[in-house]
Structure formats: structure tokens, C-alpha cells
Amino acid sequence: MACKGVKNNVKGEDISNYKIYVKGGFYMSLVQIISIIVFLVTFIFIVTEKIDRTIAAMLGAMVLLIVRIIDQGNATEFIDYTTIGVLVGMMIVVAIIKRTGLFQYLAIKVAKMVKGDPLKIIILFGIMTAVLSAFLDNVTTVLLMIPVTLVISKLLKISPIPFIMAEVLSSNIGGTATLIGDPPNIMIGSEAGLGFLDFLLNLGPVIVVILFVNVFLIRFIYRKELNVEEDLKKYIMELEEKNAIADKELLVKSLTVLFFIILGFFLHEHLGYESSTVALSGAAILLLISKEDVDEILVEIEWPTIFFFISLFIIVGTLEKVGVIKMLAKFVIDLTKGNLVLTTIIILWASALLSAFLDNIPFVATMIPLIKGLKALAGVNIEPLWWALSLGACLGGNGTLVGASANVVTAGIMEKEGYKITFKDFIKIGFPIMIISILISSIYLLIFKLR
Amino acid sequence: MKQINVKETMHEMLLRQMGANVICFLGKQCFVKFNINGYEISYAYNINAKEKYFLQRVRPYPMIAGVFEDLKDVVNMIQIDVEQFKNVIESGKFEKFLELNKKILDTARNLEDLFLYYIVDEQVFDEISKEIEKVREKIYECAEPERRVYFKKDPETL
């Protein structure tokens, strides 16, 4: 165990491996206790939002380095470059595609297709957001949908909240369907060796069912608020989707590269490439052929998110290295007696309920080594556990306003636009939808993955 | 930043629907403020990667100072402008100058409103033009070379 700092007591004796009695027959070493304290304090700061989550995670990681529980080499090893690569690559691609006006074009086209009828727009915008979210980050997707939704609701003289709720909930649902749709899936895929097709084939079908239930439920809930006079619908029909396209040449280039990126995601396992290689190659090629200013594009990468991930990987990697995760895995096996069905259902529901209130990224980052530990200790087929973790962590985000980054970002922007979405408003719609989603997921896992 | 991006996209969409060509680029907006004997002299300009700097005087009265290719020219322009204002302020005639300037700016707005909101006979154009010419002649008359006090830069219009 690399532990040069927490080493000597006043007499100069090595104390790092001293076993300290904790409770209930548990003994822990000093490094394990310090690692847990750093993890918990960081987690508390992230959850309570007393300080910015990126700063909290960076401080936690740095404390582990400063007290020399890990060294620079360990820290670098812990960082999952596949997750970071996919995130950065896709952020670059989206930053360029965004400049073409494609997303506005699609939204206007969809609104006109249903002749400006809000009862149909809400369903199609929900589905459109989910599909986009399957390939883009959830926050990015809602940020692309919000402006056009605000314009359309202003033209229809109705509140944008029903549309926005449909979109934000659908973005969290749609993101669950693919490897690249939601950061927890990128992490799970990278660590569990699951590819794009694995996610799409195993989670795609259940997500389609959940999505349709979600959008029709939201439409039913808000049906009274979505009635508008026929006269107002003509404003939507007057919108010209072609005007939304800002740069045709860039659009053609972007769509061509995006097509190859998606093709690459489908084939990456067969070709023996990491998903990050696909995303970063696409990003590099698009940067080259788009002739966009590299500085301007790279500024648009969400660097706080990237540093948050890097720091979390270091913290959770340390917990794994010092043996805390192994202890937790043993505890879970003792609790469930190695029963796969019980473990899967517990992981699904616990992930969902915890993710509804906590940031799902640190939670998933902690659960991944734990699930790997279960395999090592109990030797069970852990594939259903990965799907349970993904479904629980991603769909759980819909439970409350703080459950997912997309919810928080949307609420912040809507408040500044004059439409407040309170914690209570969100939970009234989001929590029942989350419970229904997890019920559907439980049935799906029991029938198709655990029989 | 996210809020700014959403606002930008919304406005861009509305403007594009009006048929406009909208170009957005990343840059920094700088506000420069001086206090000369209790008078605020301020400027706004942007810095961006496209090497074009739009300088505008904000106070004591707004005026577009121009588009510059080099950031050095922006600083020079501000320096000269501030020196000239300092001279006027120290001359003790600044309040009168401000009053006059305000009248001219208000007149320009009145003129715009007149032509944008009312049907105006062509003859009125000529009458107003004649009156403006009289004012300009008076300005030219006063700008005698021997009364010039600032020499670092030549006047742009006289």
C-alpha cells in the first residue's frame, strides 16, 4: 500500500497499517479511515452544495495526494480516460453542430408537422429530446431545446413549463438508452467492458416503453394548460425552418462526421476501439474540416464537469485501492446472501431513490468498483447488476429537482426567464414518473434478465 | 454562461426568423471609466479573435468612436478623447457644451421620429436642411486656425 505520509507516529513507528476497531467486529486501517472521511466530507459538500461540486471534488482528491495516501502515479491510474474522452469528444462535436442551427430546424419542423397543436408538440418535443439525449449529454440536450421551446410557447401564448417538464424528464430517460447518453453509462460501459450496442440492445427496449408512458402521462397531466386558440397556431406555421440553418456547408460536414461517429459507436467493440477513440477522432476531424476557431470551440467544453470527473475518479480509486470497496462488497454479499435477483432489485431501487436526491455521478463511481467486487467475491453473473445500476441511477434523476444536472440547469434558466419550477412543483410530476419508470424497469429485469 | 447561451440562441432564432444573418462570436466586453473633476467619462469596447474592436463613448454623451483593427488604436483614441475632455472641463465651459450637445442629440431624435411616425412634405426636408446648414456654417466660422488649442490629432470633420 503506497502510503508514505500517514506513516509515522511520534516514536517514528509506521502506523499506516495499524488496525483500529470500528464497530460490530470491523477493523480498519488508518488510511482506510482517512480515505472514508475524505470521501464522506467531499460527498457532503457535493450534496449540500455548500461549495461548488467541482471545487469540493478537487479539494478531496488533493487532500488524498497531500497526506500521501496515494501518489501522483496512483492518481493518474485512477482516472478513467474513456469516460473523459467520450465527454470531451462529444462536447466538441455538439459545440460545432450547434452553430449550424440544426436543432432549431428540427424543432420548428416538428412543431409545424403537427400544425402548431401544443398537445401534439409536447409529445413530439419529448420524444425528440429523448432521441437527441441518447446521443448527446442530457444537459446539452435541454440547453438546445429550451430556447426554441420558449420561443414556441411565447408564440402560442402559453406557459412553457409543460413542454420543459416533458423535455427534461425525457432527456433523463433517453440518455439511459445508450452508452454515451448519460455520464453514468459512459462510466459503467468503460469499467464493465460494455459497448454501445450492449446498452442499446439491453436498455433500448425498456427505455422506449418508459419514454412513451412518460410523455403521454405528462400530456395528460398538463392537458388543460395546453389548449390554445386556433389563431395562435398560425404563428407557428409562419416560422420558416430554413431560416434556422445558419451555415449549410458546416451542417453537411457536421452531419457527415456525426453519422460516422454514430457508426463508430455501433462498431467500436468489433473494431477493437474504445468509445473515447471514436468520439475524439470524430471531434478532431470535425475541428479540422469545419475550419471553426479551435479556441472558441474548446471554450465551450464544460471544463468544470471534466475536472469533477477527474477528481471523483481519484477519490473513488483511492477507496478501492485501500480496500474500502472490498469491505463494502463483502457487506452487501452478507446482506443479500449472494442472491442475484435480490441484489439486482436492491441496486435498482436503491440507485433510483439515492439518485433522486444525490448526484448520480459520485454514486455510480462508487458503485462500479463495488459491483466488480461482488463478482470477484461471489463469482456471480453481474451483468444484470450493471443494467440495474444504469436504469436506477439515470432514471432516478427524474425523482426530484436536484436528482439530475439537467433538472437543476433547467430550473435555473427557467427562473431567470420568469418561470419558477420549485422543488415541490418538480417532485409532484417527477417522483411518480420515476416510480413508474423503476417499476417498469423491475418488471423488465425480472422477465428478461433474471430468469 | 449557460443562461447567456440560452438567451443568445433564443434571440438568434427570433432574428433569423425575421430574415437576419446573425453572426455571434466569443469576445470580451470592456468598460473604461475616468473621473475628471467630478465628471464621468466612460467608454465601452469589445475584444475578440476577429481583430475588430468596436469603440463607443458612453458618457458624458454616447457616440460611436469607430471600428479599429488594432487594440493600440483603441487606447490611443481613448487617450486623446480624455485629454480633449479634460481641456474642455478645465475651460469652465463644459456644462454649456454638454447642454448644447444634448440639444443636438435630442434634435436628431426628434427628426428621426418626425420622419418615422409622420407624413412629411418634401418641402420640410429642404427647410430643415437649410436651418442645419446655418448651424454648421456657424461652427465652421468659429473653427479659426489661430483659436485651435489641441494639436496631437487633427479634427476629423473640420
Image: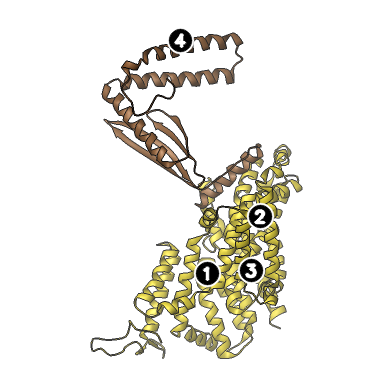
Chain colours: A yellow, B brown
Q: Which residue is mark 2?
A: A221
Upstream in sequence: badge 3 or badge 2 = 2
- Protein chain holding label 4: B
Instruction: Say which amino acid is labelled 4.
Output: Lys
Tell me which chain the residue with mark 2 is part of: A
Dot 3 crowding, Cα within 10 Å, few <14, some 14–19, many 20+: many
Q: Residues within 10 Å of mark 1 (few under 14, many from 20)?
A: many
Could you say where residue A72 lies in the image, as x and y percent from the top left?
A: 41, 77
Q: Indicate the position of residue A423 as horizontal and vertical percent values.
A: 52, 57
Place of residue A40 in the rendered image (x, y in percent of width and height, measured from the top left): 41, 74
Circle nearer the N terminus (2, 1): 2
Amino acid carrying label 1: it is Ile
The residues bearing labels 2 and 4 have C-alpha atoms spaced at a distance of: 71 Å
Picture quadrant of residue B32: top left
Say which residue label 3 marks. Answer: A278
Measure how far apart labels 1 and 3 are at the Cα level. 23 Å
Looking at the image, is mark 2 or mark 4 nearer the viewer? Answer: 4
Asked if labels 4 and 1 share a chain, the reply is no
Disc 3/disc 4 C-alpha distance (Å): 72 Å
Number of on-image labels: 4
Q: Label 4, on which residue? A: B134
User: Callout 3, which amino acid?
Assistant: Val
Q: Marks 3 and 2: same chain?
A: yes
Q: Which residue bears the numbered disc 1?
A: A361
- Secondary element under disc 2, as helix, strand or loop, is helix
Q: Nearer the viewer, mark 4 or mark 1?
A: 4
Q: Are marks 3 and 2 in contact (CB under 8 Å)?
A: no
